[in-house]
Image (spheres, rainbow, N blue to C red):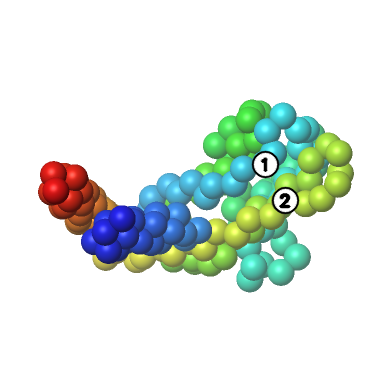
Amino acid sequence: MSSLTSACLCWILLSVVVLASDEQKAESGQNVVLPCQAPKGKTIVILKWSRADLEEKYVLLFRDDQFDTDPSFKNRVDLRDRQMKDGDVSLILKDVTTADDGEYQCQVLVGDGSSWKRSVITLRVDPPGSGGGSVGLIVGLSVLAVLLVVAVVGFVIYRKCKQSQDSY
């Protein structure tokens, strides 16, 4: 494999890692989905969404087949799928403000009670009108487009080099 093709593959892998980060960005006033996945096919006994700076409080709690929400999040949070089919326990946070900025934790205990599944998502909320969310999306998509072009060009060069080597 040529060094150019190896470099392209490294760039593609790096972009996938960067794009798969556990950080969500939003602008004030938007609704945000914070993703979390429980094991599929298992009964969810306890689901707790919390935020690091709220100490013992929680954003949303599901226990004993009932949902409870912290008063400061009342009417602003819900699950993407309240039936939690296929283990989807993603949290919808409505009408975010800069006060919602922070690190959110999803904790799930399934029916067998063997262990907690935990994931952490950082939410960054830009002030209204800052356009930070739009700029980030445009930059991210532009980087992805450039990486795809580089990968395609690298593949074409690799194929041409391979063809010329085979003709000798």
How far across and how far down the image is residue 121, in percent? 55, 59
- 85 displayed left or right of 44: left
**Of the pair 49 and 152, the residue shown nearer to us:** 152
**Of the pair 23 and 168, the residue shown nearer to us:** 168
Snapshot quadrant of residue 133:
bottom left
Please tell me whether mark 1 sits on a helix, a strand or a loop: loop
Asked if the residues shown at circle 1 and circle 2 are in contact, with their CB atoms under 8 angstroms apart, the answer is yes
Mark 2 neighbour density, 10 Å: few (under 14) some (14–19) many (20 or more): some
**Of the pair 1 and 98, the residue shown nearer to us:** 1
> 126 above or below 82?
below
Can you see residue 27? no
Mark number for residue 38? 1
Residue marked by disc 2: 117
* Separation of residues labelled 1 and 2 (CA atoms): 7 Å
Snapshot quadrant of residue 71:
bottom right
What residue lies at 63% left-to-right and 56% top-to-bottom? 119
Mark number for residue 11? none
How far across and how far down the image is residue 166, in percent? 19, 45
What residue lies at 68% left-to-right and 33% top-to-bottom? 40
How far across and how far down the image is residue 34, in percent? 52, 50
> 108 above or below 50?
above
